[in-house]
Amino acid sequence: MNITFIAADGTETRVEVAAGESIMRAAVQNDVDGIIGECGGSMMCATCHCYVDDAWADAVGPQEDGESDLLDCAASEVRLTSRLSCQIKMRPELDGLTIHLPEAQL
């Protein structure tokens, strides 16, 4: 399965990811600039903030409990499609997912 990350400057990076893996972990393991994942995916920071592409928002689903509280601490603008990438797990119906990255994480 694949995810395309689009940086704030428009640079695209496509990575392969296994089912069940978090979007954050896929980004970190593939050195995608723009996702830090400082807490390692334990939902204790907002350094994996991302924007789900509008076309994928329904498939990805709503924020998990507690995400909005952490997103209040995000370094970049929080939008309706903002998510913590550590809370999005890859599944077959998300193959081809597009994720936009914010300008800053810290």
Image (cartoon, helix red, strand yellow):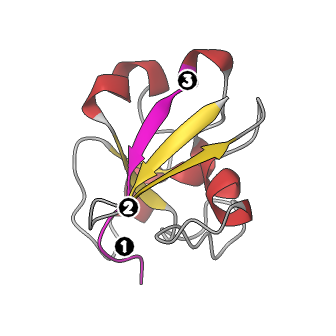
Which residue: 23% across, 42% down? 80
Image x and y of residue 41, in percent: 69, 60
Q: Quadrant of the C terminus?
A: bottom left
Contact between labelled residues 3 and 1, with CB atoms less than 8 Å apart: no
Q: Earlier in the sequence, mark 3 or mark 2?
A: 2
Neighbor class of circle 3 (other Cα within 10 Å; few <14, some 14-19, many 20+) is some
Q: Is residue 94 left or right of residue 59?
A: right
Contact between labelled residues 2 and 1, with CB atoms less than 8 Å apart: yes
Residue that mark 2 sits on: 71
Q: Nearer the viewer, mark 3 or mark 2?
A: 3
Where residue 95 sits, quadrant-wise, is top right
Which residue: 57% across, 73% down? 36
Residue that mark 1 sits on: 73
**How far is mark 1 from mark 3, CA to CA?**
27 Å
Image x and y of residue 47, in percent: 50, 71
Identify residue type, mark 2.
Leu
Image x and y of residue 20, in percent: 77, 33
Q: Which residues are magenta?
A: 94-106
Which residue: 27% across, 71% down? 76
**How far is mark 1 from mark 2, CA to CA?**
5 Å
Which residue: 25% across, 58% down? 78
Circle 3: element type:
helix
